Image (cartoon, rainbow, N blue to C red):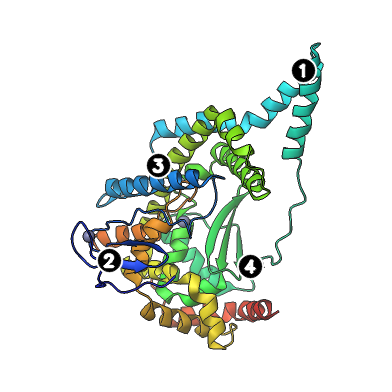
Amino acid sequence: MTLAATGTDERCPRCRAGLVMADPAPAWCPACEWGLDAFDRHRAPRTWGLRAGDRADHWLAFRLNRRQYDSLVGRTVGRRGNPLARVAMLLLATPLLLLMPLVLAAGVYLAGSASPIGMVLGPAIIICTLVLVWPRRREEPLWQPWVVDEVSAPALFGLLRRVADAAGTPMPHEVHLDHDVNAAVTVRGIRRRRVLCVGLPLWAALDPQERVGLLAHEFGHFVNHDARRGLVVRGGLRVLHGMLGVLAGAVRGGSLWVLPVVFLGAPVLWLLSVTLLILSGRDSQRAEYLADQIATRVAGTAAVAGLFDGLLISDGLPAAVAAGHRSPADPLTWRTAAAHLRTSTPLETLALLSLRTEASLLRSHPPTGLRRRMVRSRPAQAAQIEPDEQEWAAVGRDLAPWFAKLAKRLSG
Ligand SMILES: [Zn+2]
Ligand SMILES: [Zn+2]
């Protein structure tokens, strides 16, 4: 998509400022944000089976995102969400979790009944349910992350420990590195092991102090009580994602008849699911803003604001590195490409556009543009942790062998 500069002939009907033309996306006004809420059918993912579902999702999420931003701006984000909403989420997620066992039980009951309809319908329900929930051999991802430990990366672990201490969060049990332009934390298994995964390209592309912000944000997830990471709500949402996956598969296969059957056949179930998405999405976004607040305290306002600029241009990073014909084994390659993208990309426009492109009830994070705006709207904070050049050099030496692996992976 090409973004034309403002000041074209097209004028905003509300404030007469020049519109941003983003062909083939709908134009919008950068001054008063007129038109920003328009649904961009070329770029929106197909999630709900029906385009009308995607449109409704976008419409609602855009407004909820804005409302939540307005309610939090200028205030301290709470450690925990609304307790009543938490109870409601548990109540909504439980039937979703029990959905498959209940349907299966109904099938068994019908199969055992004396009526001839039940004897046909019962086994059919059992077979359909089993087909749906039967564990499929999950396709192994092509590339696994590399596990790094304290022995092989003492300086990196020293930095992680300092950031975790300053953030007031526990350390991860495992640290992974991979090839993504991303970073994430997960909590795995019954033992609830905390895993931090840092994508080497993103790490290399960020300014050093922004990396502190990235780590502090990720660690913030260990203490921000995000309802979507709790066992019951996460389980309920997984069932919902499974249902959407089956729907999308049916639509792709041309079985359009499945849409009215599913949406009209189980309206209560969908109502329940959407309510759960709305409530848990609000709590997830609160948790993200809280993680950003923690990151700002640890790394300072300037670094976290810069981190968002880094995230805004991250999609274009692999292509920029590939076009530069320089080795991805050298972290400087990523840094140079990112620096070029940061100066050549209209960051303010991209930040604003993210309010449109990142509006969906299924997303856990608020749009990057709103997170960026939130951090910038608060009184500036100085950094608590500011590693010096020597410390960064030691971390760089720790990571050098992994960057060599990254280069092999990307070239292979
Ligand atoms: Zn305007
Ligand atoms: Zn996050």
Residue at disc 2, CB closer than 8 Å to ligand 1 = yes
Compared to residue 41, the image places residue 239 above or below, namely: above
Query: Helix, strand, or loop for circle 3?
Result: loop
- Label 1's element? helix
Q: CA distance from mark 3 to mark 4?
A: 32 Å
Q: Amino acid at mark 3?
A: Arg
Residue highlighted by disc 1: 118
Can you identify the residue that label 2 sits on? 19
Q: Is residue 181 left or right of residue 402?
A: left
Badge nearest the viewer, 3 or 1: 1
Q: Amino acid at mark 2?
A: Leu
Residue to which mark 4 is pinned: 149
Mark before the other along the chain sequence, 1 or 4: 1
Category of crowding for the residue at label 3, using alpha-carbon neighbours closer than 10 angstroms: few (below 14), some (14–19), many (at least 20): some
Q: Earlier in the sequence, mark 3 or mark 1?
A: 3
How many residues crowd around disc 4 within 10 Å: few (fewer than 14), some, or many (20 or more)?
some
